[in-house]
Every structure is written in C-alpha cells, then in structure tokens.
Image: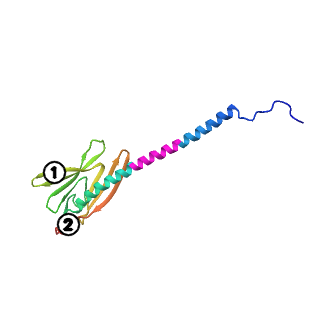
Amino acid sequence: MARVGPARPGGFTVIEVVVCCLILALVLYALFDLLGAGTKMSRQELELLGLQADSQRSVVRFLATIQESMEVMLPQPGSTLPYAMVRDKLNQVVVFSLVESKTKGEYDLKMELLTPQGRSGQSIMSGVSRLTFSTLSDGALRLHMTLMTGNRRYAFYTQIRCRNRDAAGL
C-alpha cells in the first residue's frame, strides 16, 4: 500500500541545526583551549630557557673567578655558609655573598673585592633564592644555588677546585 499524506521535506529541522551548532561550538572551544595551553607552556619554557642562559653566563664568570683563586678562606673545611671568601693570585680577598633585591624572596649575588686600598663590589647575578658554600678537606668548594624567575626555579649543584692552589703551596 502506498502511503497517502504529506511528504517530509528533504532539509533539516531547526532543532537538528541548533544541536549541530552546539556540538561544533564545544569542539572549537576545546581546540582553542588546547592551543592556548600550548602557547602558555611554550611561553613558560622560553622564560625558563632565558633564565638558564642568563644564569649560565653569570655562573661561568662566577665559577671562573673562584677557580682562578689560590685559597678558600671561608667557609672552613667541613662547614657550610651562605657566603664564601677566597684569596686570588694578587693576594686580594674576594667575598661572594647575597644581598636583598627589590623583589621579595629574591637576592642578588654580590662579588666584593677587598684590597689594602679599600673595597669595591658589584652585583654579578640576580634572581638567586638560595646559595650555600661548603669547603671540602681537599680545598675544593661545593656550591648549591637555586635561581628563580616568577614561579619557576632552576637549581644546580657543583664542585670547584682552585686551580692555583698548588702554585700557592697549599
């Protein structure tokens, strides 16, 4: 038997179109949210890489100064301090210590040169949140430093031996 009555038109109903638009909007929202999170992560990683590059340059200068010294005067072997004092080839004393910076919870690493003529100091690194020095029995200096920017932290631990220690007869 043939069906008698009005035939259904070939298009979509309004409800079907609205449901399709809602599903499409949810998919687009999730996609944009995912892309935004990726952009935020890449920005944070770029910030961390910048911090690491800046700190690496400063740390290399800092470690070279310590390595070229003749003797670690402070801390005494077996002790740990938040500052270090070394004597260089010209018999000058160099003190490394932390001074408060403008940012709360951060410090600047200051290198101060003590000579018979007086003192001169300069900030050689900023963004330091923690720094400790330990001297080992063989005269090597162990260093633990934590650098920070925003809520990101970069920590490292190294050991430095004074190159000119043997020349000084120590």
Mark 1 and mark 2: Cα distance apart in space? 23 Å
In the rendered image, which residue does mark 1 sit on? 120
**Residue topped by disc 2:** 164
**Residue at the spot 34% in from the left edge and 50% down from the top edge:** 51
The residue type indicated by label 1 comes to Ser
Query: Residues in magenta?
Result: 32-46
The structure residue drawn at horizontal position 58% and vertical position 37%, both measured from the top left corner, is 25
- Magenta stretch secondary structure, dominant: helix
User: Among all residues in the image, which is located at the extreme top?
Assistant: 6
Instruction: State whether residue 85 is above or below residue 7.
Output: below
Percent position (x, y) of residue 30?
55, 42
Q: Are marks 1 and 2 in contact (CB under 8 Å)?
A: no
| Count of numbered circles in the view | 2
Report the front residue among 5 and 27. Answer: 5
x then y, percent, for residue 124: 24, 51
Tell which residue pokes out farthest to the left in this image. 117
Q: Secondary structure at mark 2?
A: helix
